[in-house]
Image (cartoon, rainbow, N blue to C red):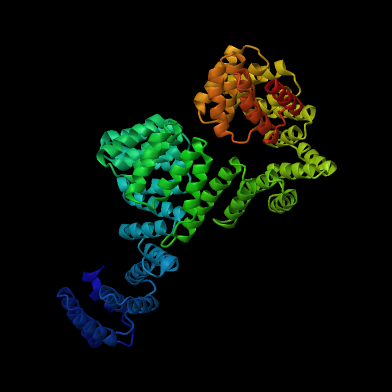
């Protein structure tokens, strides 16, 4: 504020009708007001300012001072009225605009919200028009733009400020933050590097650069800069948690766990570190320890949604979908009082999605479809994937009419989505309309330019329709577009296996493993295929064991391992794995059949009959079960018992 120059301003602002005596009296009362204000007698100060205003009614700067005084007295509405009048009377007065800007900003940070902040920004811009080198106003305006998330304007103001003060470390940090918010990683990195040139030992700048590299998916660089920041501030728990998160997202759970443990050594109740530790342990397949961590968090706060959700995902990871469903049902039945409405919707959508998957794994397909439908109704507009989950559940529930209605509604919203198109074709086929299904698929296949993902969807339709030659041809087309796509190679291998071209299938699966050696589905498929046909069974078992090591709770992999052991005549171990597989794949026809064969080999014909009968009533979506063979085994088993 320009207190020392106010007399000159008054003299300049006085209209022609005001004489020197009135100006002198106005200045006198203004000075008395200033003295009262310095003595903290705001009432007397306002009285004297009003006298000055009455003597010189055209002086906008007097009104600006009145506005400031009223603001100090927390009479904001009156202050705004005075400041507006000051601007009207003295449109070229930087002090008047500045007073009004401060008031609008105060309103914006209170009940005035975004509209008031925008008015504040406009007034600060006027101040800078009149005083282009006012650094303090630049700082205030930059903060307002940050509050408004107007990052491009914020960057513009910080650039102006740095032209005034090119040695400002804070200026470069804030400029980098604005560019980071604009997803301009290159400009953001440049600003933060200049900040580091000014302060080479700034943990803050190193962390900011780490944040940039995280956004750019440059994990190694992100980790490097977070570690440099920690060298400077080794006790910073926030930095260590940031490093732990980027390590976790990079699928380096052991390293993420180490960072979480370091934080917990300093702050044993840190809920962010507990959550990170629990997720890392879950991904490391240490499920019991992970659950203990989740329970530890819940002991601190029974309403900790993240900890409860962690419990659900741990149950999912160990294929205990009954426990997962129970936990998710409890989460959805919670008291939502005090929750933010938008956050509640997002959370409920996530919980319902997982509940739908759990129901689906449990064979509760109608309930799965209902869960996905509820997820569609909360948390904003549904995406194609969510709509597809609901259609898939309805298809599995054999509610083809409702599924067809839903998928057509979804395709109206997302007409170019290949997954939804494939689902409609599948439903038409299941309803007996093969011509309609083929028309959709042919249109997808003819799409130009060819898209590997779309062709994979077409091939999936042909696979389900048992048109394996067409599936193979489509997948070979897809390979010309994306020759190293492991999903396409997996589908091609499966298509060849279904055509009993087993050597060709093996060649494709081995090619896929050369690209992705740790693909559990491919390891399992190749291992099971060779074990089942009695070829290189020792190697087949090693392949399956690698799949089990990668996903130890997967019932299909446990079944494959048991079957390989059976082929090697290690029937006692085979039975152990098949019983575990039955616990995971609760209604699989093939798993029941395998266990029946093993029990028969071990001389337990009575129980073998139980499982063969279960096989005939079990789920066999891939139609792998040879029902005639199972029926023959039942007849032979019954005959042997009678003898």
Q: Pinpoint residue 228: horizontal percent, then vertical percent.
A: 32, 33
Q: In which quarter of the image is residue 519?
A: top right
Q: Looking at this rendering, what residue extends furthest in the right direction?
A: 435
Residue at 35% across, 52% down: 161
Quarter of the rendering occupied by the C terminus = top right
Taking the image as drawn, is residue 356 in sight?
Answer: yes
Residue 167 located left or right of residue 617: left
Looking at the image, residue 423 sits to the left or right of residue 133; the answer is right
Q: Is residue 347 above or below residue 604?
A: below
Coordinates of residue 254 in the picture (x, y in percent): 39, 29
Residue shown at the point (68%, 50%) measured from the top left: 414
**Is 585 in front, or is 154?**
585
* Residue reaching furthest to the left: 39
Front position in the image: 217 or 106 = 217
The x and y percentages for residue 483 are 66, 25
Residue 513 drawn at (x, y percent): 59, 21
Q: Quadrant of the N terminus?
A: bottom left
Q: Which residue is drawn at 41% across and 31% down?
A: 286
Q: Which of 227 and 162 is in front in this view?
A: 227
């Amino acid at each position: 504020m320009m207190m020392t120059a106010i007399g000159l301003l008054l003299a300049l602002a006085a209209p022609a009708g005001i004489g020197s005596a009135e100006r002198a009296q106005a200045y006198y009362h203004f000075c008395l007001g200033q003295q009262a204000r310095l003595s903290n007698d705001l009432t007397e100060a306002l009285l004297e300012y009003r006298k000055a205003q009455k003597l010189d009614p055209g002086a906008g700067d007097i009104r600006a001072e009145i506005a400031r005084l009223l603001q100090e007295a927390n009479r904001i509405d009156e202050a705004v009225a005075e400041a507006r009048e000051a601007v009207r009377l003295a449109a070229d007065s930087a002090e008047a605009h500045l007073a009004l800007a401060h008031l609008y900003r105060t309103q914006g940070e209170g009940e005035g919200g975004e509209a008031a902040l925008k008015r504040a920004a406009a007034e600060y811009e006027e101040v800078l028009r009149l005083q282009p080198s006012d650094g303090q106003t630049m700082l205030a305006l930059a903060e307002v733009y940050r509050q408004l998330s107007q990052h491009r304007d914020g960057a513009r103001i910080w650039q102006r400020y740095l032209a005034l003060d090119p040695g400002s470390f804070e200026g470069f940090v804030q400029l980098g933050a604005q560019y980071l918010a604009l997803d301009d990683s290159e400009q953001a990195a440049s600003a933060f590097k200049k900040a580091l040139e000014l302060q080479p030992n700034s943990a803050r700048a190193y962390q900011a650069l780490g944040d940039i590299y995280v956004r750019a998916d440059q994990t190694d660089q992100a980790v490097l800069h977070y570690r440099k920041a920690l060298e400077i501030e080794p006790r910073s728990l926030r930095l260590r948690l940031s490093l732990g998160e980027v390590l976790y997202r990079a699928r380096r759970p052991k390293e993420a766990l180490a960072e979480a443990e370091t934080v917990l050594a300093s702050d044993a109740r840190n809920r962010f570190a507990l959550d990170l530790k629990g997720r890392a342990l879950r991904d490391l397949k240490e499920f019991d320890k992970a659950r203990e961590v989740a329970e530890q968090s819940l002991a601190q706060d029974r309403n900790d949604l993240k900890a409860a959700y962690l419990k659900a995902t741990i149950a999912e990871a160990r294929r205990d979908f009954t426990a997962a469903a129970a936990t998710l049902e409890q989460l959805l039945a919670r008291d939502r009082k005090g929750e933010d409405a938008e956050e509640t919707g997002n959370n409920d959508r996530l919980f319902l999605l997982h509940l739908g998957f759990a129901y689906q794994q449990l064979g509760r397909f109608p309930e799965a479809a209902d869960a996905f439908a509820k997820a569609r109704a909360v948390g904003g507009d549904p995406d194609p994937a969510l709509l597809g989950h609901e259609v898939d559940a309805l298809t599995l529930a054999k509610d083809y009419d409702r599924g067809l209605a839903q998928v057509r509604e979804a395709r109206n919203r997302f007409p170019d989505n290949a997954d939804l198109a494939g689902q409609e074709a599948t439903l038409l086929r299941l309803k007996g309309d093969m011509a309609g299904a083929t028309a959709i698929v042919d249109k997808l296949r003819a799409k130009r330019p060819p898209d590997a993902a779309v062709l994979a969807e077409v091939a999936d339709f042909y696979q389900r329709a048992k048109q394996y030659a067409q599936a193979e041809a489509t997948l070979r087309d897809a390979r010309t577009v994306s020759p190293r796509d492991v999903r396409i190679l997996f589908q091609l291998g499966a298509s060849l296996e279904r055509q009993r071209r087993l050597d060709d299938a093996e060649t494709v699966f081995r090619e896929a493993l050369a690209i992705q050696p740790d693909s559990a589905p491919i390891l399992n498929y190749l291992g099971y295929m060779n074990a089942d046909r009695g070829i290189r069974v020792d190697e087949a078992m090693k392949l399956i064991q690698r799949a089990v090591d990668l996903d130890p709770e997967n019932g299909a992999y446990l079944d494959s391992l048991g079957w390989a052991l059976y082929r090697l005549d290690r029937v006692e171990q085979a039975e152990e794995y098949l019983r575990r597989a039955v616990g995971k794949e609760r209604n699989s026809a093939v798993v029941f059949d395998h266990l029946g064969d093993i029990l028969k080999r071990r001389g337990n014909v009575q129980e073998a009959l139980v499982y063969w009968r279960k096989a005939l009533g079990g789920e066999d979506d891939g139609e792998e079960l040879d029902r005639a063979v199972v029926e023959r085994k039942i007849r032979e088993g019954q005959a042997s018992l009678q003898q």
